[in-house]
Amino acid sequence: MFKRYFVLVLSLVLSWAVYSQEVDQTQPYSMMKQVAEQAFNRLKNEQPKIHQDPQYLRQIVEEELMPYVNAKYAALKLLGPNLRGAKHSDVEVFIKEFREYLVTNYAQVLTQYTNQSLEFAPATEVDADRRITSVKVNIVDAPRPDIHLEFKLRKEKNGEWRAYDMVAEGVSLLSSKQSEWSGKIRRDGILAVAKDLQNLANQPIHFESKSK
C-alpha cells in the first residue's frame, strides 16, 4: 500500500517545477502550489516525448525538481547518528550519490503520472523566525481513496524554502529509508551504501507493464 502512496506522491507533488515563470521560494505554501501546477502542465504537455524517451525524465527532474529539494540536508538527516566519527570525504560521497539516487528515483516514479489532481490545505502563516514548516496536500486519485500528504520544508539562510522530506499517510520517506539503510551503514560503512545508491542511480528509466 505504501508503494502506491510513494509512487503517486513523487509523480505529482515532488515534481515541483519552474515551467513558465519564476517561483517565489520565500513563501512555502504558495511556492509549492505554484510549482505543482506548473509541473502538471509540463508533464501533461510533454507526455509524447517522455514516452518516446523515458530517460528524458532525468532532465526534467534535474531542471525542475532538484532546485527545490535540499538533498544535502536530507542525506545528513538520513545518516543521523552514523555521522559521528565518519570521514568528511565519505559523507561527501554519500551526499553526491544520494542526490543522484533521488534523480533516478523521481524520474522512475514520474512514469506513473496519469493526470491525478491535488487539493492543498488552507495556507497557514509561518513565523519569520521559524526554520521548519510543512504543507499538507491531498492527492485525488478517484475512484481510489484520497492520499493524505505532508511535506516538510526547511528555510535556508537566504530566506528561501526547500523540501527535505514528505510524510504519506503518516509514514516519513526519510525515516523509512533510514530504517532500510542504517543497518548496512553500521555494518559495512557509509561508502558501501553510497555504492549501492550509485548502482540504483544508474538503472535505466522504464515504463512498467500494466498487464496483470
Image: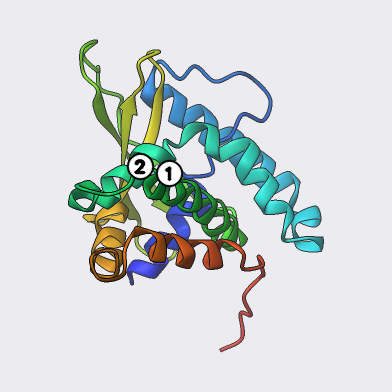
Label 2 and label 1: CA atoms lie apart by 6 Å
Total numbered circles: 2
Q: Which mark is residue 121?
A: none
The furthest residue to the bottom: 212
In this rendering, the answer to whether 76 lies above or below 159 is below
How is the model colour-coded? rainbow
Question: Where residue 92 appears, x then y in whole percent?
Answer: 43, 44
Quarter occupied by the N terminus: bottom left
Q: Which residue is mark 1?
A: 92
Question: Which amino acid lies under the numbered mark 1 shown in the image of this protein?
Answer: Glu
Q: Is residue 149 left or right of residue 53?
A: left
Question: Residue at 45% of width from left, 52% of height from top?
Answer: 98
Question: Residue at 45% of width from left, 20% of height from top?
Answer: 25
Q: Which quadrant of the structure image shows residue 143?
A: bottom left
* Viewer-side residue, 42 vs 185: 185
Question: Residue at 65% of width from left, 37% of height from top?
Answer: 63
Secondary-structure class at tag 1: helix
Question: Where residue 153 appears, x then y in whole percent?
Answer: 32, 32
* Viewer-side residue, 82 vs 65: 82
C-beta proximity under 8 Å, tags 2 and 1: yes
Q: Which residue is mark 2?
A: 88
Q: Work out whether residue 141 can be spotted.
A: no
Quarter occupied by the C terminus: bottom right
Residue count near mark 1 (Cα–Cα under 10 Å), binned few <14, some 14–19, many ≥20: some
Q: Work out whether residue 121 can be spotted.
A: yes
Q: Nearer the viewer, mark 2 or mark 1?
A: 2
Q: Is residue 89 left or right of residue 153?
A: right
Question: Which amino acid lies under the numbered mark 2 shown in the image of this protein?
Answer: His
In this rendering, the answer to whether 7 lies above or below 211 is above
Question: Residue at 61% of width from left, 86% of height from top?
Answer: 211
